[in-house]
Amino acid sequence: QVQLVESGGGLVQAGGSLRLSCAASGSISRINAMGWYRQAPGKERELVAAITSAGSTNYADSVKGRFTISRDNAKNTVYLQMNSLKPEDAAVFYCAAKHSVLGGWYYWGQGTQVTVSS
């Protein structure tokens, strides 16, 4: 089994920055890509950013140029640096990891709240 624990959420003013962290533990060999999803009230969960074990990244169009995903494989931790935050970025952010054999976003963290005040 794999456990994902997020941290770093909170309240920030529009234009500010936050960095989210997600520490993975357990059967790390079962995961390859890691990513961040978010879900705002009344909206579907959406992929914000993802990073492969080799370091390739992809981003939702809405966050390109503002968010940066990175990964420290030695620490089994993935980060999401969020700059120039907007009120519409407010959501619960979830860390996720893909199963290396079964595929798909198989493992999920408990979520961390990001609130952006205008």
Image (cartoon, helix red, strand yellow):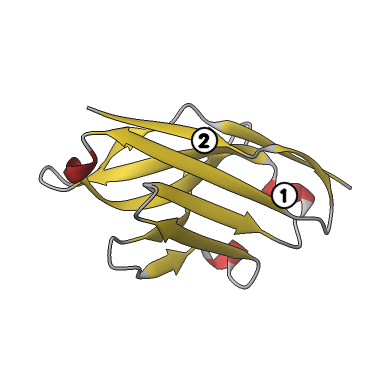
Residue 69 position, x and y percent, is 50, 60
Element assignment for label 2: strand
Residue 64, quarter of the rendered image: bottom right
The residue tagged 2 is 6
Q: Nearest the camera: 96 or 78?
A: 78
How many C-alpha atoms fall within 10 Å of the one at disc 2: few (<14), some, or many (≥20)?
many
Disc 2 marks which amino acid? Answer: Glu
In the image, which disc is placed on residue 97? none
As drawn, 72 above or below 36: below
Q: Tell me if I can see residue 44 in this picture.
A: no
Q: Residue drawn at (52%, 35%), measured in percent from left and top? A: 6
* Residue located 28% across and 68% down the image: 54
What's the amino acid at mark 1?
A: Glu
Which of the pair 19/14 is nearer the observer?
19
The vertical placement of 102 against 84, above or below, is above
Q: Residues within 10 Å of mark 1 (few under 14, many from 20)?
A: few
- Foreground disc of the pair 1, 2: 2
Circle 1: element type: helix
Residue 41: x percent and y percent? 63, 31
